[in-house]
Image (tube, rainbow, N blue to C red):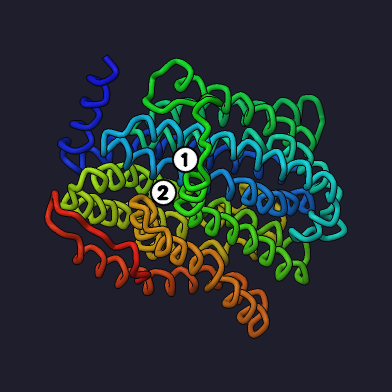
């Protein structure tokens, strides 16, 4: 029975028409991304009603969540890419080793972040960009985020494993359930019980652990080929280094994203809590507009990884270009929507003239970046899915930090607040210009289906 299931999945991943397969995997993932983004925005929306400084605290804690997710995505993508390629090569036992090892490593990493964060709570929140007026709210909110860190990190692993196995429905179920619970929890705890920002933190922590429990159930019920059990934990250091090397681009992307948010908060601080609050709101809105493209990209990854492992390179090429075209179409609509409705979107979060003024300009400018993001996103995901961690890490770093941070510093110094508002768009344009020739060169070098392809040595 298990062998029949394995063969059935192999045929589905290697014979289903590529556009249909990518969309089939992308739709549930996109739904989960939308739900996750909505409940992140709900946190910002509900907390923003409590004041501008409290709204600024969401921007600080967003950087903390990026740190936790950085490790979760590193182990998740490291496991998922290996699992999909192993299943493509009919090596189910190795896939289970990667799944269990990554899960327990992520849970341990989340626990360490939570403990260290609570031990050095005040300096950590200062480092992430808290001002004196924001700090009390950031401490209260982040306490519960740190408590939920093990669940948050390990859920990233299970979500990615399910996607890479082509079982995105289970990932949607776990993330969507947690997201919906968090929204209603926010409403009840913040406003009905008058717990303020503490209520938002409690709601997030509870929803994260419930989401984790839902995500782990398919593994225990043997609905997927991977397993999560202590007996599958690897004893080989090479497996751990493989997971970390493959997932390292995600660590760099999310880690540098956290550093970028921290520096963004610090650069915005001289312009008051309103600037930090406005940029926090804009960041959440852009992520919401971008999450459909991200969902398509995550639908592309398992198709790319599985068919690369099966040596069906023509399907890898087709999946990549289909994802680019689809993302450009979606992002064009999202960008126009954000530009046209920038004012009512920002006003929905905070009725503060300073926040509205800063936020409208920043949102309209950053919507232009949505036209560049698909190239960086799909290029990064292509190299990561097939195990080309050097290229994937480089592309992750140029968008998340290597380009954005210097641009942010330079423009904020030269033209002040307007430089802060425009820096992300300029960085995304540069990142796309670097990514496109790298991807085109790589795709042209791939051989015919069934042939051996070794590209481990060349960085570019």
Residue 215 at x, y = what percent? Answer: 51, 26
> Residue 178 is drawn in which quadrant?
top right
Residue beneath the point at 23% across and 36% down: 13
Residue 257 at x, y = what percent? Answer: 58, 59
Q: Does 59 appear above or below 426?
A: above
Q: Quadrant of the N terminus?
A: top left
Secondary structure of the residue carrying tag 2 is: helix
Estimate how packed mark 1 is, as few (under 14), some (14 to 19) or many (20 or more) residues with alpha carbons within 10 Å. many
Residue beneath the point at 31% across and 57% down: 328
In screen coordinates, is 316 left or right of 137? left
Q: Does 55 appear above or below 187?
A: below
Numbered tag placed on residue 294 in the rendering: 2
Residue beneath the point at 64% across and 65% down: 358
> In the rendered image, is residue 289 in sight?
no
Q: Nearer the viewer, residue 165 or 63?
A: 165
Ranked by sequence position, the earlier of labels 1 and 2 is 1
Secondary structure of the residue carrying tag 1 is: helix
Q: Quadrant of the C terminus?
A: bottom left
Residues at discs 1 and 2 in contact (Cβ within 8 Å): yes
Residue beneath the point at 49% across and 66% down: 399
Q: CA distance from mark 1 to mark 2?
A: 8 Å
Question: Residue at label 1?
Answer: 33
In screen coordinates, is 217 left or right of 10? right
Numbered tag placed on residue 189 in the rendering: none
């Amino acid at each position: 029975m298990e062998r029949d299931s394995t063969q059935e999945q192999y045929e589905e991943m290697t014979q289903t028409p590529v556009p249909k397969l990518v969309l089939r995997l992308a739709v549930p993932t996109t739904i989960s991304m939308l739900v996750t983004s909505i409940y992140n925005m709900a946190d910002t929306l509900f907390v923003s009603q409590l004041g501008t400084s409290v709204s600024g605290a969401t921007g600080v804690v967003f950087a903390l969540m990026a740190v936790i997710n950085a490790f979760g995505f590193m182990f998740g993508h490291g496991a998922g890419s290996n699992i999909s390629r192993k299943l493509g090569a009919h090596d189910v036992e190795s896939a289970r080793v990667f799944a269990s090892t990554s899960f327990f490593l992520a849970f341990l990493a989340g626990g360490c972040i939570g403990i260290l964060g609570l031990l050095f709570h005040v300096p950590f929140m200062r480092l992430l960009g808290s001002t004196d007026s924001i700090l009390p709210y950031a401490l209260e909110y982040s306490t519960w985020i740190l408590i939920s860190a093990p669940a948050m990190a390990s859920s990233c692993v299970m979500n990615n494993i399910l996607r890479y196995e082509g079982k995105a429905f289970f990932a949607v179920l776990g993330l969507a359930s947690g997201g919906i619970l968090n929204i209603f929890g926010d409403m009840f705890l913040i406003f009905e019980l008058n717990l303020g920002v503490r209520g938002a933190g409690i709601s997030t922590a509870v929803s994260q652990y419930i989401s984790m429990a839902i995500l782990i159930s398919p593994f225990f019920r043997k609905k997927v080929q991977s397993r999560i059990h202590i007996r599958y934990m690897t004893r080989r250091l090479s497996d751990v280094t493989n997971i970390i090397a493959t997932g390292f681009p995600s660590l760099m992307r999310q880690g540098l994203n956290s550093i970028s948010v921290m520096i963004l908060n610090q650069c915005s601080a001289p312009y008051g809590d309103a600037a930090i609050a406005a940029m926090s709101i804009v960041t959440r809105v852009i992520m919401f507009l971008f999450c459909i493209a991200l969902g398509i990209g995550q639908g592309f990854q398992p198709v790319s990884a599985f068919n690369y492992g099966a040596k069906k390179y023509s399907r890898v090429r087709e999946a990549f270009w289909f994802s680019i075209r689809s993302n450009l179409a979606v992002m064009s609509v999202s960008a126009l929507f954000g530009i046209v409705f920038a004012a009512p979107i920002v006003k929905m979060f905070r009725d503060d003239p300073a926040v509205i003024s800063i936020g409208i300009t920043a949102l309209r400018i950053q919507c232009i970046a949505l036209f560049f993001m698909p190239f960086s996103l799909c290029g990064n995901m292509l190299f990561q899915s097939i195990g080309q961690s050097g290229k994937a890490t480089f592309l992750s770093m140029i968008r998340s930090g290597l380009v954005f941070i210097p641009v942010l510093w330079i423009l904020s110094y030269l033209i002040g607040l307007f430089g802060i508002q425009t820096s992300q768009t300029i960085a995304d344009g540069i990142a796309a210009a670097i990514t496109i020739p790298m991807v085109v060169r790589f795709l042209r070098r791939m051989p015919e289906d069934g042939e051996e392809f070794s590209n481990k040595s060349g960085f570019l």
